[in-house]
Amino acid sequence: MIKMLKTLTLGALLASSLAHAEPALKLGTTAAFAPPLEAAVAEAKKQGLEVELIEFTDWIAPNVSLANGDIDVNYFQHIPFLENAKAEGGYDLVPVARGVINNVGLYSKQYKDFASLPEGAKVAIANDPVNGGRGLQLLQKAGLIELKPGVGYKATQQDITANPKNIRIIELEAVQLVRAYEEVDVVQGYPAYIRLANTFDPGSALLFDGVDHPEYIIQFVTQPAKAKDARLLKFIDIYQHSPAVRAALDKAHGKLYQAGWES
């Protein structure tokens, strides 16, 4: 009888524990950011926090899923991208904390400097409003064009006020730019995607934008009601301060990133 009571008591305790266990935090991301997040998920598990990492293959679905409540948070976008997505999709989403800022560069297979570019050189940049604006800012930094004062990341080709070499700007899907490296004179490139494609050296850019524009720091984004979720805040703390995660970031991005929360 005593044995049976003990068994029933243990069973009741287990059932009670499972009933009160927190559900896994669902985190959406894309391939470029997944490896360091996997390290953070493993570290979180050691600390009793279950996190389910969901990888998306495009840059639209993570915000759609977040707005629909299918995931709790996403990590793949910076403020300009978020603001553009909110304007286009009507999403009620907020940034919660900073992640990393990945350098974006201008690459050339044939030329070693911008002065060597010929008249009418073909230059490929991203075709979406946000990343395209970042590409145009890079071209201005390189001295290839001039933009209207103050347009910032919202720049379009209509904002170009000077183009001394009459470069031909070709707009492509951001994730397709790595393939244009062989076909154009200069291409806007994302080191993370270049590394995934394994086609050329991601550190070989003629110019990087670095931390010139802190608005491009990648953000943890969620719905306003979940902004103070204890699970989320704990995971962010792990991501920002775990030595294991920092090692994974270094392995994934080399020297081509900065910790945005430290700036």
Image (tube, rainbow, N blue to C red):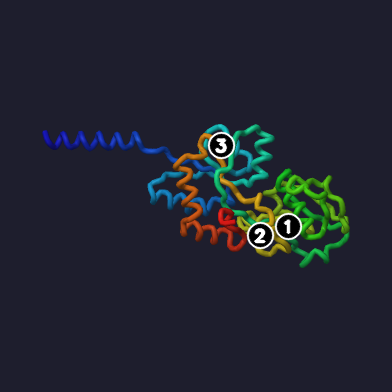
Q: Secondary structure at mark 3?
A: helix
Q: Secondary structure at mark 1?
A: loop
From what the image shows, is residue 6 above or below residue 201?
above
How far apart marks 2 and 3 lie (CA) works out to 33 Å
Instruction: Identify residue type, mark 2.
Output: Thr
Q: Nearer the viewer, mark 1 or mark 3?
A: 3
Which residue position is annotated with label 1? 181
Instruction: Identify residue type, mark 1.
Output: Tyr
What residue is shown at x 81% (from left), y 50% (from top)?
149
Dot 1 or dot 2: first in sequence order is 1
Q: Are marks 1 and 2 in contact (CB under 8 Å)?
A: yes
From what the image shows, is residue 78 above or below residue 186?
above
> Residue 119, image x and y in percent?
88, 60
How far apart marks 1 and 3 lie (CA) works out to 34 Å
Instruction: Check residue 66 in the rendering and tell me which mark sits there, or answer none.
Output: 3
Instruction: Check residue 199 in the rendering and tell me which mark sits there, or answer none.
Output: 2
> Residue 247, image x and y in percent?
50, 61
